[in-house]
Amino acid sequence: MTLEQAQEAVDNWIKTVGVRYYNELTNTAILMEEVGEVARLMARIYGEQSFKTPEKEATAKDDLAEEMGDVLFVLICLANQTGVDLSASLQKIMDKRSIRDASRHANNPKLKD
């Protein structure tokens, strides 16, 4: 699915199942909540925090994928609400980073093996 298709699919879902978009401020708060859930899982899967139960650890990577999907869904909602074309936005950012960071990372001694 392309970003354009994703934006269309989310918009269609909102208009047929979700009734309407939450307002932009509510969706921003929901986005922060979802990012927090990703951060919580990252801290437990890749960081020093531990899971409260072994059962939680067993499904953690599946949970992480779902939480990242939630982040993407809400971000797409916000893009749709504010008229942002995510494909164009991502391309602009990639172009900017390619120019700005053309040698920055290659010359960063902290990134050398």
Image (cartoon, helix red, strand yellow):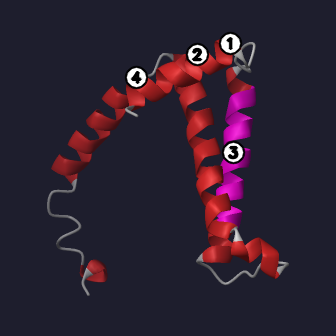
Q: Nearer the viewer, mark 4 or mark 3?
A: 4
Mark 2 to mark 1 CA distance (whole Å): 6 Å
Q: Nearer the viewer, mark 2 or mark 3?
A: 2
Q: Magenta span covers which residues?
A: 26-41
Which residue is drawn at the image coordinates 68% and 59% (left, top)? 63
Q: Amino acid at mark 1?
A: Thr
Asked if disc 4 and disc 2 are in contact, CB closer than 8 Å, the reply is no
Q: Do callouts 4 and 3 mark residues in contact (Cβ within 8 Å)?
A: no
Residue 20 is one of the magenta-drawn residues: no
Mark 4 neighbour density, 10 Å: few (under 14) some (14–19) many (20 or more): some
Please say if the residues under marks 2 and 1 sit with CB atoms less than 8 Å apart: yes
Residue corresponding to mark 3: 32
Depth check: give the residue in front, 70 or 82.
70
- Gap in Å between the C-alphas at discs 1 and 4? 21 Å
The residue pinned by badge 4 equals 85
Figure quadrant of residue 64: bottom right
